[in-house]
Image (tube, rainbow, N blue to C red):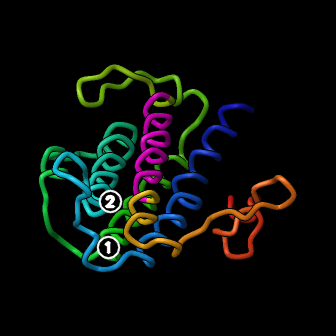
Amino acid sequence: MAADLFISRSRYWLTKEYPIKLRHCVDALPRATVWARPNATSNSVGNLLVHLTGNVTEWILGGVGGQSVKRHRASEFAQREGAEANTLLDNLEAVLREADSVLAGLTAEDLERSITIQGRDTTILGAVYHVVEHFAMHTGQIVLLTKLYAPGKIRFYEDAGGLARPTWHQGTTLDEAAH
């Protein structure tokens, strides 16, 4: 069923592939660069990790899961210093575990249910889709910042006869990583 596949793949991206890649980045980053901004209008890795935590909390735990959530989105970007990257990622991973529990309980009928998040009318499916694509975008930004601040320290794929073979999953196959 398409709904089950959508939920399963969303859970995979949010609990496996993206956090594994983020952990590689955090481990490679020099400590002083976590809150560094490439320029005045850019965000730091720290800002992005805090922002992802806020987004998943608001959209999945609050919007989809019905939990009471208080979030001040602008402060996620205003921060200029804060916790170390490993602590920020640990906080994000804790929220992702909670979100995974919410996602695991969804049914095909739930996906069609209308909800409102940040004043936007959407469905549960739309909210989950938003969180996954939003997480992917910011994961890509963190990967880019890591490549700028720690050149050569991360590599997620190797070319295998024209195919990109993942190196990030530490020996597991994609099917194993999905469970």
**The magenta segment:** 126-142
Picture quarter with the C terminus:
bottom right
Name the residue: 32% across, 46% down: 55
Task: Quadrant for residue 131, please give it.
Answer: top left
SS at badge 1: helix
Near mark 2 (Cα within 10 A), the count class, few <14, some 14-19 or many ≥20, is: many
The residue carrying mark 2 is 49
Asked whether the beta carbons under mark 1 and mark 2 sit within 8 Å of each other, the answer is yes
Name the residue: 42% across, 66% down: 146
Whole-percent x, y for residue 59 in the image:
35, 40
54, 47: nearer the viewer: 47
96, 134: nearer the viewer: 134
SS at badge 2: helix
Picture quarter with the N terminus:
top right
Whole-percent x, y for residue 94 in the image:
38, 66
Near mark 1 (Cα within 10 A), the count class, few <14, some 14-19 or many ≥20, is: many
Name the residue: 46% across, 59% down: 143
The residue carrying mark 1 is 85
Q: Is residue 86 above or below residue 125?
A: below
Magenta highlight on residue 129: yes
Q: Is residue 18 left or right of residue 95?
A: right
